[in-house]
Image (cartoon, grey):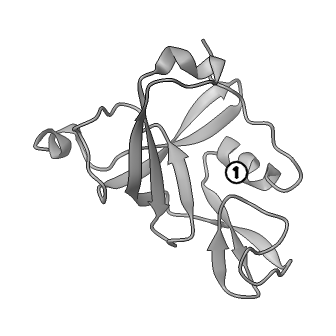
Amino acid sequence: MPKPVPLPDAVTKPFWDAANERRLVAQFCLGCNRYQHPPQEKCAKCDGGDLEFRQLSGRGTIYSWQIMHDTRVRLMQEYQPMVIAVVESEESPDVWLLTNLPGSEQGQFDIGDPVEVEFEEVAPGTFIPQFRLAGGPNDQESK
């Protein structure tokens, strides 16, 4: 069963266009020199409208996580129970991204562990950013 496909609007379109090019970006406010995510029409800190999307490294750390046992999203029920993690971007503590940590199960990772972005094709030509534990599988087996 396919996963849900993003439906970009005018504000989020640059984020999803970059994802379809297998690039991770976040909004950056030129007024207060701050990243923000998810994308918004104005800066959440200074209310300025001088925003641009900047490329991110794709690296970050696990900020928080939980196991989802009962999702209400019909297209995701096949994948439960599943890990849902919040990843803090290497570039800024203001950029948090949600992921399901594909290939990982509870007990294989901890808060603070490094992760790297990868892109999953959920429909032809449509990609979503996901994060995997950084390093090879042997790096994580010792956990």
Most extreme residue toward the right is: 10
x, y percent for residue 139: 17, 46
19 w.r.t. 43: above or below: above
The image quadrant of residue 123 is: top right
Type of amino acid under label 1: Ala
Decide if residue 28 is on the left or right side of residue 91. right
Q: Is residue 14 above or below residue 121?
A: below
**Camera-nearest residue between 68 and 94:** 68
Residue at mark 1: 18
For the point 84% across and 56% down, which residue is it? 11
Could you say where residue 19 lies in the image, as x and y percent from the top left? 66, 46
* Residue 95 x, y percent position in the rendering: 57, 65
Residue 122 on image: x %, y %: 64, 26
| Residue sitting at x 83%, y 72% | 42
> Which residue reaches farthest bottom?
32
**Farthest residue, direction top:** 1
Q: In screen coordinates, is 67 left or right of 96?
A: left
Pick the front one: 80 or 126: 80
Name the secondary structure under disc 1.
helix
Q: Is residue 39 above or below residue 65?
A: below
Residue shown at the point (60%, 11%) measured from the top left: 1
Work out which residue is located at the far left of the displayed protein and give it: 142
Q: Within the image, what quadrant is residue 33 found in?
A: bottom right
Is residue 24 found left or right of 82 in the rendered image?
right
Q: How many marks?
A: 1
**Eyeballing the image, is 17 above or below 84?**
below
Assign the C terminus to one quadrant of the image.
Answer: top left
Circle 1 residues within 10 Å: few <14, some 14–19, many ≥20: some
